[in-house]
Structure formats: structure tokens, C-alpha cells
Image: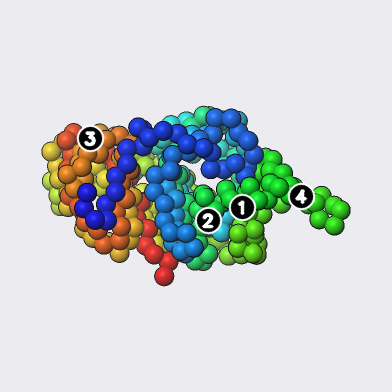
Amino acid sequence: MPDGIDIVHCAEMPWGESLVAQRGATEGMAHKRLFEGEEDSPDNYMLVMSREPKSYFSPRHRHPWDQIRLCIEGKIPIAKGLYIEGGEIGYFPEAAPYGPQEGGEDRIVLLLQFGGASAQGFIGPDRLNEARRALAEKGTFERGVYSSRANGKRVNRDAYEAIWEHVRGAPPAYVEPAYKTPIVMRPEAMRWQPTENEGVERKEIGVFPHRGLTITGVRLAGGAELELKPLPALRFLLVVGGRGELAGKELRKLSAARLLQGTTGRLSAVEQVDLVELALAPTT
């Protein structure tokens, strides 16, 4: 594989432990860790596949970083009466509150979490679990809340905020959110646009300049090829259907590729292949 390109085949990877145990024990919750960034970097990130049962609960909350959720199947609740359904993509801006997450349907989700424009970074799963275990010696985690005792009184806090303070030594500093609420995008309602490359179409799904984030649909007809131009951004390609190749390596449904900043590679389609491209510029 050329330097700067990594590919994993998500459907064939084994499910691992839940990475949201701070929200409380939920039977059936599991994750596959696909790609991770550099801890302590303002641009740290984590791309995972998530299996979430409808019994999962998370209270209304917010984060000092950003996230993207692509619903592969099922239905993700993000507020009362609001869902991300199969094929839809949700963008959760830094500091924008959402939830409670309750009900919906059992779902499979591709989830990208990454440091926001405020450059506070993102706490990776290993450090998060280490902090959760340390805090569990002094209190309890249940339904997204951490409960402990201070000065003889019970104190309740958002579970993630408690972990952030344990790791960073101070509570999260929430900036004024650039968007007041999560944004749910419906790619199927957007038209494909032809490109200068024969058999290649694109659709701009979302552009969020404050964080240098773009979400793009790419479709190659069978036999078509596309030379990916180098970008000053980290890119993820998520295959939502079909078969192809990237730099001579196979892509199939639910393959995920990571292209580091400045990397190029040739995409080709064995049969029609549909992809979602997430491009993320550095915060600095």
C-alpha cells in the first residue's frame, strides 16, 4: 500500500468492546476501531463502526469537539422526535447540545469524532477508558451521569465532562457554537453532478468552513477511473455500495480508506461504486 493510504474492510472486522461505557452498561453496544489520530494533538480523531441497540440511552449533552455520524442501517435518535435514518448523515458541531438519545431502532453507524475549531482536541478511547476506571473507584456511572460524593453530599455530573476534567485538569471550555443544533443531511435528496472525468459523478453533501470540513458523495460507473488530487486535508473514503480499487487494493461495501494530508491515489470501479468522502483540514 502506498505511503499515506490505509484501507480496512469494516464488515469483516470483529466487534470489540463498547467505547461509551461512561454512559452506563448497555447490552449489545459494541465498536470496531478503524482509524485513530495522535493523542494530545488538537486534530486528534477516531473513526469507528458502532453497533447501537435501541435500548441505549444518553442524556442531553454537548462536546468540546465535533463528530459525524453516517447511519448505515436503522435509526439514530438525536432529540425527541428527530432521527438520523439509514443513508443520512449527521454533523454534530462543537458545543451544540443534542439529545436525549433514547429509542429509535437498532442501528449500525460509522462515527467520526475529531478535534473542533477551538483546538481543544479529542480524548482517545484508551485514555478515556483509563480515566473512567479511575473515576469508578470513587463514584458510579449510570445513564450518562457520573455520581460521586463531595463534602458529604452527592454530586451528579455529565459523565463525559467528569472524564474530561479528570484527564485535562479542568472542565471543558465550551465555545459559542457555530451552529445551534446538529445538522442532518439527506444525500439521497441531492442530485448527482457530472465531472470532467467520464463515468464519475459527485454531489456536495455538506461544507462547514469554520472547521475545514467537507462531505462529498462520489460515484464511479463500472470501468471508470479517478485520480484523487492531493489535498491539504485528512480524507476518509467510506464505501456505501459496489466494488472498486484504490491504489490497486480492493474496495468493497463498507470498506474504509484513510488518506493522509497531501496523499493521492487512483480510484477505479470494478462495478458501480458509491463512496462518501470526508475531508478534514488541520485546525492550525
Which residue occupies 56% across, 59% down?
A: 64
Earlier in the chain: of badge 3 and badge 4, it is 4
Real-space Cα separation, disc 4 to disc 1, in angstroms? 14 Å
Instruction: For mark 2, give the secondary structure.
Output: loop
Q: Residue at label 2?
A: 123
| Coordinates of residue 49 in the picture (x, y in percent) | 43, 39
Up the image or down, 137 lies above or below 282; here it is above
Earlier in the chain: of badge 4 and badge 1, it is 1
Q: Residue at label 1?
A: 131
Q: Which amino acid type corresponds to the residue marked 3 in the rendered image?
A: Arg
Q: Is residue 207 left or right of residue 156?
A: left
Q: Residue at label 3?
A: 243
Real-space Cα separation, disc 2 to disc 3, in angstroms? 34 Å
Earlier in the chain: of badge 2 and badge 4, it is 2
Real-space Cα separation, disc 1 to disc 3, in angstroms? 41 Å
* Rendered image: mark on residue 148: 4
Earlier in the chain: of badge 2 and badge 1, it is 2
Occupied quadrant, residue 191: top left
Occupied quadrant, residue 274: top left
Which residue occupies 14% across, 42% down?
A: 224
Instruction: For mark 1, give the secondary structure.
Output: helix
Instruction: For mark 3, give the secondary structure.
Output: loop
Quadrant of the frame with the C terminus? bottom left
* In contact (CB < 8 Å): disc 2 and disc 1: yes
